[in-house]
Amino acid sequence: MDQEQYRLMQVIEKVGVFKGFEVTELQRLLRICHLQTYEPNQQIYIAGEPSEAMLILLKGQLIATSKSGGILGQILAGAVTGEMGVFTGRARSANVIASVESTGLVVRKRDLDDLLRENWKTHVKVLQNLMNMVCQRLVDANIQLESYSRTIQSMR
């Protein structure tokens, strides 16, 4: 394994959905990843289109917008985008564009599905990680709703 592969594996293992992967699992995953560079203002995902890949951003910055064009947030290096659609089969929920030159690892749904079908232990890890991520997002949403509720109550 060369230094570049080792560095990429270190990035991948920090992605929530791949948490707890062993070295051999990371190596298998890295084999199905494709390095992709995006120019500034290049469209990466379009809301409503099929979710056929996810992206682990290595360098740069992306902007997520709603169908109507409202800014939803920034995606910074080390983050992942498109993973929920890849695992649920749902269409893209947002537009994603590169705000500066950006580079990431693309993981295609069909390749990931094949990898998970071949190794049930890896598949179970991914499912557990997804469950934890969804639960954390629910907790965060509840906290935010409670904060909004308090703000509204104080305005009355």
Image (cartoon, rainbow, N blue to C red):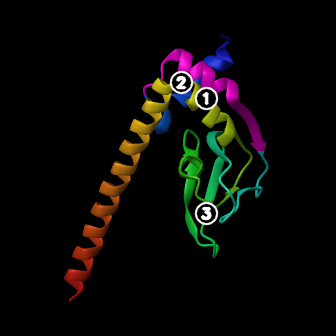
> How many numbered discs, if any?
3
Q: What residue type is labelled 1?
A: Leu
**Residue occupying image coordinates x 58% and y 63%:** 93
In percent of width and height, residue 37 lies at: 77, 41
100, above or below 2, in the image: below
Q: Quadrant of residue 49?
A: bottom right
At horizontal 26% and vertical 81% (from top left) the residue drawn is 152
The one of 75 and 45 positioned closer to us in this rendering: 45
Q: Say which residue label 1 marks.
A: 115
Instruction: Answer whether residue 36 is magenta in the image.
Output: yes
Specify whether residue 107 is in view: no
Alpha-carbon span between mark 2 and mark 3: 31 Å
Kind of element beneath mark 3: loop
Q: In this view, does 131 lie above or below 143?
A: above
Dot 2 corresponds to which residue?
A: 119
- Disc 3 marks which amino acid? Ala
Residue 67 placement (x, y as % from top left) = 63, 72
> Dot 2 surroundings within 10 Å: few (below 14), some, or many (20 or more)?
few
What residue sits right under mark 3 in the picture? 94
- Judge the density around disc 1: few (<14), some (14-19), many (≥20) Cα neighbours within 10 Å: some
- Which quarter of the rendering shows the C terminus? bottom left
Q: Please report the residue visible at 68 percent of the width from the left and 12 percent of the height from the top.
A: 2
Q: Which of marks 1 and 3 is nearer the N terminus?
A: 3
Secondary element type, mark 2? loop
Callout 1 touching callout 2 (CB < 8 Å): yes
Magenta segment range? 20-37
| Residue situated in front as seen by the camera: 132 or 72 | 132
